[in-house]
Image (cartoon, helix red, strand yellow):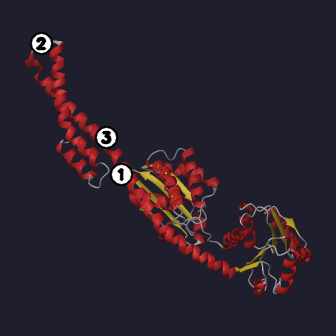
């Protein structure tokens, strides 16, 4: 049986190709049925995200799996196969197991350590399981991949540090305030970065978010999205003394907040700290605001430096995670080799039993009438001889089943006892 993966991702294909190959949730059920019906294919699963589309199958060894899957993808999405091929990669057997483990552990992601891919892989597996397209080797490998991902998360810090601008801003806020549950936030501007930061703040427990924007309709849309309250743009300065965290992403051409203004606000707050996150370009907050006591100002370059340092840390953790993946690949292969020797042992026992019975029948006519006790003695004697003969080779098969030379030992015993016949 061959395990095979064919696919493309953010490194091998531009988004214009990835989006054309992507499967919608509504397309996946039919696609899985078509995949399973391909000649020689036993199991099939499709993982389709914004950054990758991968097809995993198990198939008979003689099947030209890569060609079958390439044809399947090009026909399913009505794409020219010749134009698709340069973007595709393929992994077989051990390399396929390693690839699945690395994908599950987020070592193959655009942002190493991001948690979303594991959930996406679980959803793809769950659908394939429900549709009956995984039930054997592929089922075992993907199930084990979930355990590998958990081990990587537990034994490394690969997912701990912030590696996006918006998430870095929230982590810095957490360092300043500790818990964010009681902090009030104001978003000045309704840009995408503000939205992402607000989402992270919500996940961190923030319950009060104020939203202001020059265009009221955009402020309203963002407020609904983050369960916030709209503040009229001309009134936001008067509300600043009531908030602890300010995120600015306005397109204003001039500074919105100045040093003297922030001094007055901090005085009104009785020197309670404020955290200002300026992710606008050009900047919304004057740099010298950072000189005001109890004001912590970070602009997008500050946050980028945090992200860059964290990314370096994640890459170091990724090296440790890859060691875990290598261990788990070896462990799974050893387990699979152990399972594969079962039929060989059964075949050897059956072969020797056939010889034993044949020899008894061959000489039975020369023995004459036998008593039940004599029949039992012959049975015990011949079985004992067969078991002693089988003991050595069976012990060697089991001893070497998980070792690298296991297949050599098995093949030698098959040849000696002519099990292939």
List x then y, in percent, for residue 316. 49, 71
Query: Where is mark 1, residue-wise?
Result: 334
Query: Where is mark 3, residue-wise?
Result: 343
Tell me the element at label 3.
helix
Counting residues from the start of the chain, the first of labels 2 and 1 encountered is 1
Is residue 349 rendered to the left or right of residue 19?
A: left
Residue at (73% x, 63% y) in the render: 179
Query: Where is mark 2, residue-wise?
Result: 369
Counting residues from the start of the chain, the first of labels 3 and 1 encountered is 1
Residue at (53% x, 44% y) in the render: 132
Asked if residue 323 is positioned above or below residue 253 in the image, the reply reads: above
Residue at (64% x, 78% y) in the render: 304
Asked if residue 337 is positioned above or below residue 200 in the image, the reply reads: above
How many numbered discs? 3
List x then y, in percent, for residue 224. 82, 62
Asked if residue 236 is positioned above or below residue 109 in the image, the reply reads: below
Is residue 64 rendered to the left or right of residue 150?
A: left
Q: Is residue 11 visible?
A: no
Tell me the element at label 1.
helix
Tell me the element at label 2.
loop
Image quadrant assignment for residue 277: bottom right
Is residue 267 rendered to the left or right of residue 206?
A: right
Q: Is residue 165 visible?
A: yes
**Mark 2 to mark 3 CA distance (whole Å):** 38 Å
Of 132 and 400, which appears nearest the observer?
Answer: 400
């Amino acid at each position: 049986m061959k395990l095979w993966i064919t696919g493309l991702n953010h490194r091998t294909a531009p988004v214009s190709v990835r989006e054309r190959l992507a499967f919608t949730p509504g397309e996946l059920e039919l696609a899985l049925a078509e995949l399973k019906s391909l000649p020689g294919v036993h199991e099939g699963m499709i993982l389709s995200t914004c950054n990758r589309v991968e097809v995993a199958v198990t198939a008979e060894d003689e099947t030209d799996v890569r060609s079958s899957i390439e044809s399947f993808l090009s026909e399913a999405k009505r794409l020219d196969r010749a134009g698709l091929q340069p973007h595709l990669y393929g992994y077989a057997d051990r390399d396929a197991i390693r690839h699945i483990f690395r994908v599950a552990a987020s070592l193959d992601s655009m942002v190493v350590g991001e948690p979303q891919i594991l959930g996406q892989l679980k959803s793809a597996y769950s659908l394939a399981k429900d549709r009956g397209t995984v039930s054997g080797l592929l089922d075992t490998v993907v199930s084990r991949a979930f355990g590998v991902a958990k081990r990587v998360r537990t034994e490394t810090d690969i997912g701990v540090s912030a590696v996006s601008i918006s998430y870095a801003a929230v982590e810095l806020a957490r360092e300043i305030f500790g818990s964010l549950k009681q902090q009030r936030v104001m978003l000045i501007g309704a840009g995408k970065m503000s939205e992402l930061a607000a989402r992270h703040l919500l996940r961190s427990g923030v319950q009060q978010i104020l939203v202001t924007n020059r265009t009221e309709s955009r402020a309203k849309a963002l407020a609904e999205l983050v369960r916030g309250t709209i503040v009229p743009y001309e009134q936001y300065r008067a509300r600043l003394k009531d908030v602890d965290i300010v995120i600015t992403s306005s397109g204003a051409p001039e500074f919105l907040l100045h040093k003297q203004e922030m001094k007055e606000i901090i005085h009104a707050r009785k020197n309670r700290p404020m955290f200002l996150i300026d992710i606008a370009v050009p900047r919304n907050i004057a740099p010298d605001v950072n000189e005001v006591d109890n004001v912590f100002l970070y602009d997008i370059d500050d946050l980028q430096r945090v992200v860059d340092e964290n990314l370096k840390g994640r890459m170091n953790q990724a090296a440790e995670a890859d060691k875990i993946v290598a261990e788990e690949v070896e462990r799974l292969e050893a387990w699979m080799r152990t399972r594969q020797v079962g039929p060989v042992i059964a075949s050897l026992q059956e072969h020797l039993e056939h010889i034993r019975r044949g020899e008894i029948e061959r000489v039975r006519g020369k023995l004459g009438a036998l008593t039940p006790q004599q029949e039992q003695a012959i049975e015990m004697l011949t079985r004992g001889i067969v078991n002693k003969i089988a003991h050595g080779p069976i012990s060697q098969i089991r001893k070497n089943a998980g070792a690298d030379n296991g297949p050599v030992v098995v093949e030698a015993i098959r040849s000696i006892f002519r099990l292939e016949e």
